[in-house]
Amino acid sequence: MQWHQVLAFVAAVVPLTLIPGTSFTLVTQRVIAGSRADGVRVALGSACGLLVHATFAAIGLSSLVMASAQALTVVKLLGGLYLIWLGVTTWRSTRQGVQPAEPGRWRLPWAQLESFGQGFWSNVLNPKAASVYLTLVPQFVTSNSSVAPQMATLAVAHVAVVLVWLLFWTSVVAASRTRIDTPRFRRWTNRLAGAVLVALGIRTAAAS
């Protein structure tokens, strides 16, 4: 793979990355509600989620899912329900008197991962992330060399773009937080983030 192909792929994926979506919303909410480190964990989780899609695409599983209407519907519903769950729990966290889950209380399997898990699963269960590796990436893969190394190169480039953007946004939000961090601001930010996540979840689940 030539360097100009990688640069062309980066140029194509940057606009997609800059569009505010789930990872952007999660980073904003987690930094304001927690700390800069929480935003970094969301960014790393999102990056790992992309690597899962790249791996699936390399071995053909993503193509199988996208080709099967039933499998794609299941992925969309799971992704949508997960985002709705995140949105509802984020909104509920703004209510007075809501306490963290007790040790013995049932929790989702990945709940203990917190910020990293949220970033990771929101990308793994996002069919749009899979579509990048099924529609965009193949346009930059050539047939005169092994596919796997080319996929790996493009995946690393994609992850680098996502990490740079999300870490940059983490720093912006963290810097702004020191000036506008008040209980009321955090409460309304959580409510807005919760509403956005629910909307994204409904859109994901309902997408045709």
Image (cartoon, helix red, strand yellow):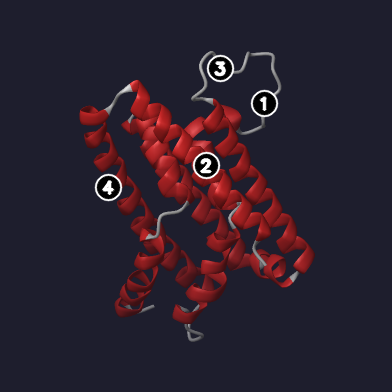
Q: Please tell me whether residue 11 is drawn above or below residue 159 in the rendered image.
A: below
Q: Do the residues labelled 4 and 3 touch (CB within 8 Å)?
A: no
Q: Are marks 4 and 2 in contact (CB under 8 Å)?
A: no
| Quarter of the view holding residue 30 | top left
Q: Please tell me whether residue 186 is drawn above or below residue 55 in the rendered image.
A: above
Q: Which of marks 1 and 2 is nearer the N terminus?
A: 1
Instruction: Single out the mark in the foreground, 1 or 2.
Output: 2
Q: Earlier in the sequence, mark 4 or mark 2?
A: 4
Task: Left or right? Give the position of 94 relative to 18.
Answer: right
Task: Left or right? Give the position of 64 relative to 133.
Answer: right
Q: How far apart are marks 1 and 3 (CA)?
A: 16 Å
Q: In which quarter of the image is the N terminus?
A: bottom left
Task: Please state the horizontal and vertical placement of residue 179, each as a whole percent of the image.
Answer: 20, 29
Q: Distance between the residues labelled 1 and 2?
A: 22 Å
User: Which element is circle 3 on?
Assistant: loop
Q: Name the residue under label 2.
A: 195
Q: Which of marks 4 and 3 is nearer the N terminus?
A: 3
Q: Which mark is residue 98?
A: 3
Q: Earlier in the sequence, mark 1 or mark 3?
A: 3
Q: Name the residue under label 1.
A: 107
Q: How far apart are marks 4 and 1 (CA)?
A: 32 Å
User: Which element is circle 4 on?
Assistant: helix
Q: Distance between the residues labelled 4 and 3?
A: 32 Å
Q: Which amino acid does label 4 sit on?
A: Phe
Q: Name the residue under label 4.
A: 168
Q: Which amino acid does label 3 sit on?
A: Val
Task: Please state the horizontal and vertical placement of residue 2, each as a whole percent of the image.
Answer: 34, 79
